[in-house]
Amino acid sequence: MSKETKQTVQTTGHAWDGDLQEFNNPLPTWWLWGFYATVVFAIIYWVLYPTFPIGRSYSKGLFNNVTYTTSDGRTVTTHWNTRALLMQDLEHAREMQKPYLDKIKKASFAEIAKDQDMRAFAYSKAKVLFADNCAACHQAGGAGVIGLYPNLADDSWLWGGSHEQIETTIREGRHGNMPSFKGRFSDAQVADLASYVLSLSKQQGVNPASALRGKTLFEGQAGCFACHTKAGTGNIALGSANLTDQIWTIANVPAQHTIEGKQAAIEHVILHGVSRRMPTWKGRLSDTEIKMLAFYIHGLSGGE
Amino acid sequence: MKHEKIETNAGLLIIFTLIVISIGGLVEIVPLYFIDSTVEKVTVAGKDTIHPYTPLQLRGRDIYMREGCYLCHSQMIRPFRDEALRYGHYSLAAESKFDHPFQWGSKRTGPDLARVGHKYSNQWHVQHLTAPRSVVPESIMPNFPWLIKNELTYKDIEDRMKALKDVGVPYSITEKEYQANVKRFGKKIAEQLDINHAEQNLLAEETKNNYDGIPGKVTEMDALVAYLQVLGTMVDFKQFEEDHFVKFR
C-alpha cells in the first residue's frame, strides 16, 4: 500500500486483528447513475404496466389498449396482459391463414392436389400437425410399429385408404378388435390355421397338407372368414387385416427367417387376439385440419 | 444499532440478510393471495370442474414425483402462440390449485405434459413408459420397465389423502364434508374424494379402466397412466368463450 493512498482514501474506522482496516471508497459514478436509471425505469414501468395491488384488485397500467377480435367476431379492448396479447397473436395468424383455409375447406381432395398453393399450404400445415398428433404412434415418417401401430406409408389400409376414409378414421377414431382363440382349438388346429394364413400370402415352405386342413377350419368351424372374408382379403368396415398381401401389421412375419418362426408369430396372434384403439381427434382438431391431415397421410403412400 | 455490531456478529448478519432478501419475494407473492382473480373460477352448471385427484390418480402422481418426471417435463403451457398450437389452451392457475406441490417445472427436456390427458391411448402410454424408443425412435427418455412389474402399494392411500386434506385439499371424512363436496363437485366426484372409501374406489377405477392392460393386477403403471390421462382434461374449454380467461389477468 503506497503512502498517498493512505492519506487520500478514508477508512471505515473498523480494525480487525489489530491492523486489518476497511476502505470506504465512494461508488463509481457510472455505477451510481446506472442505479438511479433503474429506479426511474421502475417508476415508469409501475405507471405503464399492471403492477400495484389495490384492495382485491390491482392497478391495470396506462396501456389500456390491447384490442383483439375473437374467432366468433367479438372485438374486445382490455388492459395490457399476456393472455390478451396471445388473443391478438392468434387473431393475426388466423387472418393470414384464412384465405387458404377457406379455400381448402370448400375444395375437394382432387382440387387440393391440383392447386399448387393449396397443396403446399396443406402439406406444411399437416406436417406440423402430424408431428404433434400422429408421429408419437405412427412414427415421424408414418411407418408405424409392427404389432402396435399401423404403417401409414404402405399400400395396406385396414380401414380404407381413400382420402375420405382416412379423414373418417382421424375424426372418429377406430377400435380394431380380434378376439383371443386360446382354449378354443387344439395346438394342431392352431398350427393348421397359421399354415393356411401363411399360404394365403404365398410364403415359402408352408406344409401344404396342414394348410389345407387350416383352410377348412378358416372357412368353417373357426369362423375366421366372418371378419377376414373367405378369400382372406379382410374387411375395411371391421378393420380386419388383408391376409393375402405380404404386408404385416400385427404378426411380425417379415422379421422371421424360418417357417417355424413365421408360424409362431401367426399362432401368437390367434391365441392372444388383438385390440388396438386409435383415439378420436374431432375435439382436438378442426374439420379443416383433419382434412389437411388426411390429404398429407394419403400422400405418404400414395393412398389406394 | 451500530454497523460494527452487525458486521462482527455472523448470526445477526444472517438474520438481517434474510429479512432484506425476503422483501423482494414477499411483495411479489403476498398480494396474490388477496387478489380475487389470481385463481380463476371455473364452474360449469354451478359445479367446480377442477377437482382433487381420485385415489388411483393420486398414487400415479406420487409415482410421477418418485420417478422425477418433473425434472424433464413441465406442466405449464404459457400463453404464447407456439405453445397454444402445440399443447393446447394455456394452463390456468386454477388447474393446479389442488397440487401440493404443483408440477409446473421449469425444464423442458421432454415435452410439456399439462394437457397430455386423452391425447394418447392407455396402450401407447404403457408401451412408451416401458420402452420409449419403441414408439418414438428419437426419444432420449429413460425406460421405466419396473412400472408394469411393480404391484402398487395402496394400503396407505387414506393417510396420503388425509395429509393433503390437512393442507387444504377438499377430501372428505365426515358426512358434512362429503355433502359439501356433493354440492361443490357433484355426486360422482364427491364419492371419489371420500377418504372412507378410498381403497375400494382405487380398486374399482383400476378394474373399470384397466390402464395397464393386465386384468386383475394393480400395478404402478395403472396409477401413473391414470394420472397422465387426467392431466389437463378437467376444464372443458368448449364450455367457455375462447377469451373467457383473459379477464382474470
Image (spheres, rainbow, N blue to C red):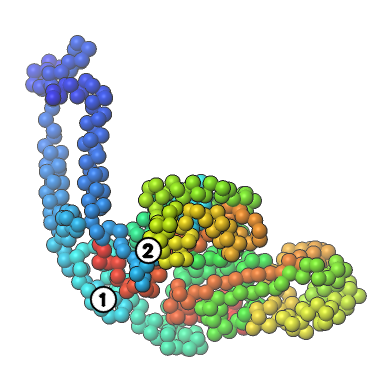
Q: Is residue B105 visible?
A: no
CA–CA distance in space, label 2 to label 1: 34 Å
> Which residue: 61% across, 62% down?
B207
Amino acid bearing label 2: Arg
Could you tell me which quadrant the C terminus of chain B lies in? bottom left
Quadrant hosting residue B7: top left
Direction from residue A282 to residue B213 in the image, left or right: right
Amino acid bearing label 1: Thr
> Which residue: 73% across, 66% down?
A272
> Which residue: 13% across, 56% down?
A47
Mark 2 touching mark 1, by CB under 8 A?
no
> Which residue: 19% across, 10% down?
A18
| Relative to A228, residue B121 above or below | above
Residue under mark 1: which chain is it in?
A: A
List the single residue furthest toward the front.
Answer: B175
Name the mark on residue B184: 2
Secondary-structure class at tag 2:
helix
Name the mark on residue B154: none
Pick the residue in front: B13 or B79. B13
Counting from the top left corner in percent of width and height, residue B170 is at 40, 55
Reading the image, the residue beneath label 1 is: A69
Residue under mark 2: which chain is it in?
A: B
Counting from the top left corner in percent of width and height, residue B115 is at 44, 63
Q: Is residue B193 visible?
A: yes
How many circles with numbers are drawn on the protein? 2
List the single residue furthest toward the top.
Answer: A18
